[in-house]
Amino acid sequence: MAQPLEGLTAIVTGAGRGLGRAEALELARLGARVVVNDYGQPGRDGSGEASAAPAEDVAAEIRAAGGQAVAHLGDVADHEQAGALVGLAVATFGRLDILVNNAGILRDRMVFSMTEDEWDAVIRVHLKGHFNTTHFAAVHWRERSKAVGAPVHGRIINTSSEAFLAGSAGQPNYAAAKGGIVGLTTSTALALAKYGVTANAICPRARTRMTEDVFAGFEEPEDGGLDALAPEHVAPLVGYLAAPAAAGVNGQLLVVHGGMVAIAERPRIAAKFDTAKEVFSFEELDGLLTPYYAQRPPNETFAAAEVLGLKHD
C-alpha cells in the first residue's frame, strides 16, 4: 500500500534535534525523501561552533529505518545558503514538494533590557530564515507549474508559536518574529495557491531544549508513558499538512500539542463605534472606549488565546 508521501521530497529546517527531528522522522515514515537541515550550533541562543553531526545523525537514522535522506549543514537565515538547501533537494531527488520551516533560536529578555543584537538575531533566524527558504521553494514550484501547465504539489508548513497568540513578556523578539511568520504564511498562501501550493502555520507546544525552562514545572511521566509534551504529538499534523489529503487546507494557523489540534480564527471585530459627528473628539472617544474597556476582564487578550486555555500572568 502506497504511503501518503511516497515519491515526494521534503526539507525540514532545524531538524537535528527536538521538533524538527520528530517532524523529519515522521515525514520519512510516511514515505517522503528528506533533506535534514541543521546548523548544528549547541547553544539554543545560536552560540557555539556549527556542526554537521545533528543533521547527519538524523539522516542516518532515517536511512537505517529504510528511508532516503541527506543532511545539509547550513544557516537558513543566510540567503545564499537557503538557496543552496533548496538546490540540494532538487539536485539529489529531482524535485522539492514539502518545506517545513522549523529552525530557530532564543535570546530572551524583557523589552526594556533587550539589546539590538538580541532583537536582530532572533528576527534574522526565525522570520528571515522562513522567508529565505520560502522564496527559493516558491521559485521552484512556480517554474515547475509553468513548465507543466498545471498546478504542482507544494506544501509549506511554518512554525509560529503561542507566544504570538497570547504574548510572552520576556520574549518581545520571539513573539514578534512568530507573529511575522503568520503574516508571511497567509501572504504566501494567497500568492502560491494558483500553482497548487499551500502554506500553513502551526503553533506547537513541546518539550525541547528550546523550551526546557518553560515547562520546568511539568515533569515527564515516571511510568515511561508518552510525555504529553513530546514532539511526537506535533509531527503527525505536519505529516498530514504535507500530504495530498490536505490540499484544501491553506492559510491556516493550527495549535497542536498532547493529542490536541485547535484551529485558530483570524482576529474578528469585537466592538464597533461610530462618531456622532464628522470627526471623533477626545471627549467622545473617552465616553465610548473607556467604559467599554472598564467592563472587560483585566488582561484580556485575543479570544483565540482564551479558547485555547492559555494562562495569562
Image (cartoon, rainbow, N blue to C red):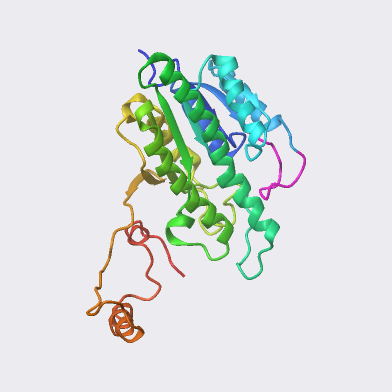
Residue 120 horizontal/vertical position (percent): 65, 54
Q: Residue furthest right?
A: 49
At a point 32% along the width and 58% down the height, the residue shown is: 307
Can the viewer see residue 6 in this picture? no
Residue 45 lies in magenta, yes or no?
yes
At a point 44% along the width and 40% down the height, the residue shown is: 234
Residue 179 lies in magenta, yes or no?
no
Can the viewer see residue 297 in this picture? yes
Location of residue 41 (image quadrant)? top right
Q: Main secondary structure of the magenta part?
A: loop
Quadrant for the N terminus in the image: top left
Left or right: where 68 falls relative to 56: left
The magenta-colored residue range is 38-49
Relative to residue 143, is residue 229 depicted above or below?
A: below
Left or right: where 118 falls relative to 280: right
Count of picture labels: 0
Relative to residue 22, is residue 119 depicted above or below?
A: below
Residue 220 horizontal/vertical position (percent): 52, 49
